[in-house]
Structures are given as structure tokens and as C-alpha cells.
Image: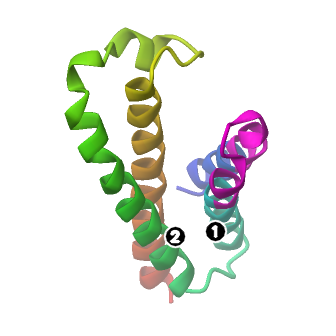
Amino acid sequence: MKILNWILCFLFLLSAVLQYNDPDPLLWMIMWGAAGIACLLYGIGKLPMWLPVAIGAVGLVWGLALLPGIIRTAGDIRWNEVFMQAGMSNITVERVREMGGLLIISIWMAVLLCKSRKTS
């Protein structure tokens, strides 16, 4: 668990940095950065209970807000492009990737919350 948390901490913070080239970088940098900071705080034993709740809730609501756009353009999803290519070929591929990232953040925040409750 601890090793996975540190790996995700690194990946979340790296994702925050990589958002610099995104068309809408600020919100994504904040989201990925907040997830990375939550992992860091968990790793050093200083995670406040409200933080993973807030980050997870924002990620879940944001991810679900992307769902109608994905459903509306579902015929444009090319799953090989979602998982196998770095570039964005269309908006649906980007939305699927964004929703996936937000759901990963939300799930990991739920894990941190559950693990924090057991240790406190």
C-alpha cells in the first residue's frame, strides 16, 4: 500500500506538471496536484480526513459531468487511440481520458480515506 501510494504520488504530481501544455492547464494542474499532495500527506502521516473527501468528490462530479459528452459522441470513440496513442485525435478520446483520470483520482482518494480511518 505504501509503495503504491508513493508511486501514485509521483504520477499525480508528474501529471500536474505535464498539464502545462494542455489547452486548459490550470484546473487540471490543480486537480492532479491536489491528488499528489494528498498522497504525500498520507505518506508522511499528516493527511486530514477532509482532503481526500473533497478531492474525490470533485473528481467524481467532474468525471460524471463529462459522461453526457462521451455518450453523445460515443460513435467517435476509438479505443486503440484512447489507450495506445499519446496524441488526441478527437474530443471524445480526450473526454474519455479525462474521465478516466478523474475516476482514478477519486478511487485512490477513497482508498486513502479508508486506510486513514483504519490507522486513526
Q: Residues within 10 Å of mark 2 (few under 14, many from 20)?
A: many
Under mark 2, the amino acid is Ile
Query: Of residues 1 and 47, which is closer to you in this image?
Result: 47
For the magenta stretch, what is the residue range?
Answer: 13-30
- Which callout, 2 or 1, points at the residue further toward the start of the chain? 1
- Quickly name the residue at label 1: 38
Does residue 57 appear to the left or right of 47 in the view shown?
Answer: left
- 109 in relation to 83, above or below: below
Does residue 4 appear to the left or right of 33 in the view shown?
Answer: left
Query: Of residues 28 and 110, which is closer to you in this image?
Result: 28
Q: Residues under labels 2 and 1: Cα distance?
A: 9 Å
- Quickly name the residue at label 2: 55
Q: Position of residue 115 (x, y in %)?
A: 45, 72
Q: Position of residue 41 (x, y in %)?
A: 70, 73
| Element carrying mark 1 | helix
Residue drawn where x is 49% and y is 77% of the image: 54
> Where is residue 58, by image quadrant?
bottom left
Number of on-image labels = 2
- 86 in relation to 64, above or below: above
Mark 2 and mark 1 residues within 8 Å of each other at the beta carbon: yes
